[in-house]
Image (tube, grey):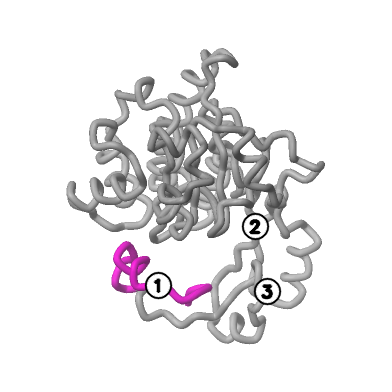
Amino acid sequence: AVNFQWTDDELKYVPNQYHNYPVVGGWYGSQDGSYEEFIASEPDIVIESIDEGGDGDLSTVKERQDKFGKIPVVAVNDTTNVEKIGESITFMGEVVGAQDKAKELNDFNNKYLDMVHDKSSKLSDSNKKTVYYAQGDDGLQTNPSHSTHGQLIDLVGGKNVADSVSQGNTTAGVQVSMEQVISWNPDKIITNDPEFYSHVYNDSNWGKINAVKNKEVYLSPQSPFKWFDRPVGANMIIGVPWTAKVLYPDDYKDINMKDATKEFYSNFYHIDLSDDDAKQILLDSGLKESNL
């Protein structure tokens, strides 16, 4: 089964055997999962995540085990932090007897983590690009620095302009005003919202901002899962090199994003993209062809 209904665009990047699985919901956001339905499908094992900043904890795992009875419930640690997710991938490889595959996935992740750790550590504050993460169709919701939702900005050495609005909660989004974004005047804007991206260059208010003037607004690739955020998870692994290319294209000329995209989709999603497929995904995100 699957948690939610795939869109037509997402189905382009989902192996055929998963296209017609029944939708059974789950325990995230809408909290519409059904113990009875899950038990009736007779799973061999139940995996419950316990995430930093998320909804799951050990008491939830114990509750699940009580409800599932003899079906074993296994907790896997943090899958929300792209820098820590390798431990969870290794653990899952052991659980399902796929250690070699887990190593392959982690090798991909570590390759780009090592690269951005090295390069970002050498950035002086004066050389860091300022970045605004625009959420919502009006672009006026955001997340501050140290949020799981904006973690890729921090990871690659960007300076999140919304850091001052953290309000003590780094997981929840915050509402900001157009005037505030104009005053921040970021070098780059990253968004997950196609509606916002479709009109930002034609909006006179956003046109006052350097990122818009300089055509430096980027839309996270969307399918089958977003690269930058929502959900936070393994889908963000390919977002590491993408965000690095967005912020510092000259520093990451050694990354071939077409090859990285094809490798990620093959290894993680079991979908083989053509060169043209990968190129189009990247161009649609706002990356310039010379930076692929």
Which badge, 2 or 1, is on the more N-terminal residue?
Answer: 1
- The amino acid pointed to by label 3 is Gln
Label 2 sits on a secondary structure element that is: strand
Tell me residue 279's x, y (percent). Answer: 23, 46
**Pointer 1 residue:** 7
Please tell me how crowded label 2 is: few (under 14), some (14-19), or many (20+) other residues with Cα within 10 Å. many
> Residue visible at 55% across and 29% down?
130
Crowd class of label 1 (few under 14; some 14 to 19; many from 20; radius 10 Å)? few
- Residue range of the region highlighted in magenta in the rendering: 1-17
Q: Tell which of 271 and 103 is nearer to you.
A: 271
The residue singled out by tag 3 in the image is 31
Q: Position of residue 151 (x, y in %)?
A: 59, 39
SS of the residue under disc 3: loop
Q: Amino acid at mark 1?
A: Thr
User: Label 2, on which residue?
Assistant: 49
Q: Is residue 187 above or below residue 238?
A: above
